[in-house]
Amino acid sequence: MSTDDAFAEAYRAHYWAVSRFVARRLDGQALEVEEVVAEVFSIAWRRRAELPDAPLPWLYGVARNCLANTVRGLGRYRRLLHRLGNHEAAHRRQTVDSPDAERPGSWVHEALARLSPADQEVLRLTAWEELTIEELAVTLGCGQSAAAMRLHRARGRLRTQIERMRRRETARPEAPPPRTDAPPAPAPAPRPATPRPLSPHPVPTRAGGRRHD
């Protein structure tokens, strides 16, 4: 197969995978996603002689560099990484208040957001893109041993954050019970008597005279 044919095959087979890879890291901003994906395959065309037999991890590595250049040029790299760690809609899921809430597992997203950008990316590559260690090494541009070590350390730091969240929830003080020794509420004051209105008609007395109220 010629290099041109290899590129055409890689483009047909992996265009949407690369698009999803970029969209997840740009929070679905369509215009920027299209620009980055176009740049990825432009670079792949220029370097088509370097395409490996399994080109997807290699394309992911190119996409990572394009993403870094794009967001750095816009002055948004740090803000982007923060949004990726904390945006609740990244996987259309909500974070919950504690590990004991109704949906265990969704709060792992909060723990992931506490990690460094490098650790977050390693974990996403293996969870979102489901890369093997060999593919992870190609994407990161390092050896397999280094990739495996980075993944191992990232998973360990994630577990540490999860345990900290568990301890925090366990140590959270409970609300005090309602008081039972509170003084009784004072009785309501008696209502004043309503004065009787004066009668307009005279009232007879015992002596036969008349008096008026």
Image (cartoon, rainbow, N blue to C red):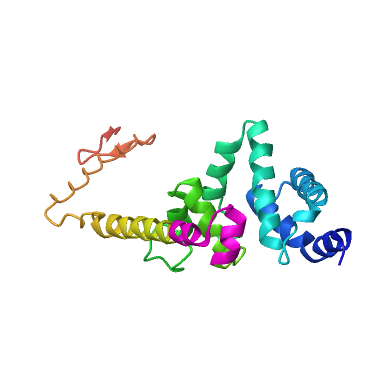
Q: Residue at x 82, y 47 (%)?
A: 46
Instruction: Let me know if residue 161 is in the magenta part.
Output: no
The number of discs equals 0
Q: Residue at x 83, y 51 (%)?
A: 45
Measured along the vertical axis of the image, is residue 21 above or below residue 53? above
Left or right placement of residue 114 versus residue 26 in this view: left
Q: Is any part of residue 94 visible from this angle?
A: no
Image quarter hosting the N terminus: bottom right
Instruction: Let me know if residue 137 is in the magenta part.
Output: yes
Left or right placement of residue 200 versus residue 72 in this view: left
Q: Viewer-proximal residue, 144 or 183? A: 144
Image quarter hosting the C terminus: top left
Query: Residue 190 at x, y = what percent?
Result: 21, 44
Span colored in magenta: 133-151
Query: Residue 93 at x, y = what percent?
Result: 56, 61
Q: Quadrant of residue 201?
A: top left
Q: Is any part of residue 76 visible from this angle?
A: yes
Query: Residue 152 at x, y = what percent?
Result: 42, 61
Left or right placement of residue 130 versus residue 108 in this view: right
Q: Quadrant of residue 142?
A: bottom right
Magenta stretch secondary structure, dominant: helix
Q: Residue at x 37, y 61 (%)?
A: 159
Measured along the vertical axis of the image, is residue 79 above or below residue 26? above
Query: Residue 138 at x, y = what percent?
Result: 61, 58
Left or right placement of residue 148 versus residue 60 in this view: left
